[in-house]
Image (cartoon, rainbow, N blue to C red):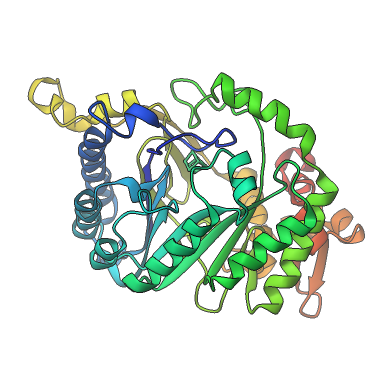
Amino acid sequence: VALYVHVPFCVSICPYCDFVVVAGAATRGPRSSMSRYVAAVEVELALRANAVDDRFGAPGTPARPLLDSLYLGGGTPSLLPPESLVRLIGIVRSRFGLAPDAEVTVEANPGPDERGDLAAMREAGVTRLSIGAQSMHDDELRRLGRRHRAIDVAETVAAARVAGIASVSLDLLYDVPRQALAGFEASLEAALALEPDHLSLYALTLDDPAAEGLTGPTGDHLAPTAGARRWRERAIPEQDEDRAAAMYELADERLRSAGFDWYEISNWARPGHRSRHNLAYWWRLPYEAVGPGAHGFDGRTRRWNAAPLEPYLAALDPRDRVVGPSPWTSLPPGGEELVEGDLAIAEAAILALRTADGSAAPFVDAEVRAWMDERLEPAITGGLVARTGSGRRLMLTRGGRLLSNEVFGLLLPSRSA
Ligand code: SF4
């Protein structure tokens, strides 16, 4: 029901970033990999579409609904030449089928040289722009290694409105090193003054994916550079959990009073503007994904493409079709895991609790509900999970949202042994 396209190009790499990204000469100039990437992703789209056709039939047949959402994320998909973006959306439309009212999101960076051709996007069917604002303070943006300024965010929102893009979302970070509560509040107010339809608020996390075993030839992350590691080592002592909690609480109150509904730990939306694509993830619906580091899920198996760009391009480069052995079957390297049994139940319980639906989420069956009831008592006693709706619905309290990893730990299968 959903398709994700990962576009791994940025102009420069922010030192806190753990997304699969390449930058510099790989993005711009004569040695850019962008045209090879576009050709490769077209091949991957064809291969994945063939496989879905074989399993479920043609798009629009009973077992194969048209896509409810398409999401181009990154990296900075708005850096793609407009004709490439239009072409990719056209291929998705013809091979996967897009529902007439499908949500089509593109992530964009602010700034005239990064936000892309918004009119062309609108013309191609883009309905939603997700803008990586991160902060509305120029000094914080500089500290984060961002290239844009607050004024660029305002101009990008205005340009999206002029282009007729129906839904505009802003991403903001909190727990930025040395960020004061008052400064965060001012940033939030400046963001609200732009009248976005949706806001994502993410705590800045500075983990090391290499230390967590997520990198390597089949890993879905890239290792941080030495410079990024040094930046993180300096930044971590300047973060503060209590201050971060105060920022989250302040934002939750303020967004509610501004007419936004909280609907997932990090997401708030005006009525009618929830991200249908992200809800597909949280509701465990099947989705396909292409591009380096991208994850797909068919309801039982989660698979991913490896993060490194060169092996991805080498596997899918259409020029190899002339000389390679059986190039149309050369899907990029990656991995997969079967999500079944207790793991599937635990995953469903955790995903349900991430959202405002809680245990009333549509995919929570009797088995998942029993799993939650058996394991969540300590979180209910501790005030992290509440029973609402005559005691029927279990959902995270605001305190539970702040300590969600502790609650989710209770739901993992190992705890049940
Ligand atoms: S712009 Fe976004 S995706 Fe690109 S490096 Fe910065 S944080 Fe990562």
Q: Residue furthest right?
A: 381
- Residue 314: percent from left, percent from top: 26, 24
Identify the residue shown where x is 28% and y is 44%.
48
Camera-nearest residue between 151 and 285 = 151
- Residue 300: percent from left, percent from top: 48, 47
Camera-nearest residue between 150 and 408 = 150
Q: Is residue 25 above or below residue 289?
A: above
Q: Is residue 249 above or below residue 290?
A: below
Give the left or right position of residue 150, taking residue 111 as reference: right
Query: So how many labels did they put on this image?
Result: 0
Q: Is residue 380 visible?
A: yes
Q: Is residue 374 visible?
A: no
Give the left or right position of residue 143, taking residue 195 as reference: right
**In the rendered image, which quarter is residue 144 located in?**
top right
Identify the residue shown where x is 58% and y is 64%.
199
- Residue 385: percent from left, percent from top: 81, 62
Q: Residue furthest left?
A: 322
Give the left or right position of residue 398, taking residue 210 as reference: right
**In the rendered image, which quarter is residue 100 located in?**
bottom left
The quarter of the image holding the C terminus is top right
Identify the residue shown where x is 44% and y is 20%.
217
Q: Is residue 237 above or below residue 353?
A: above
- Residue 115: percent from left, percent from top: 37, 54
The quarter of the image holding the N terminus is bottom left
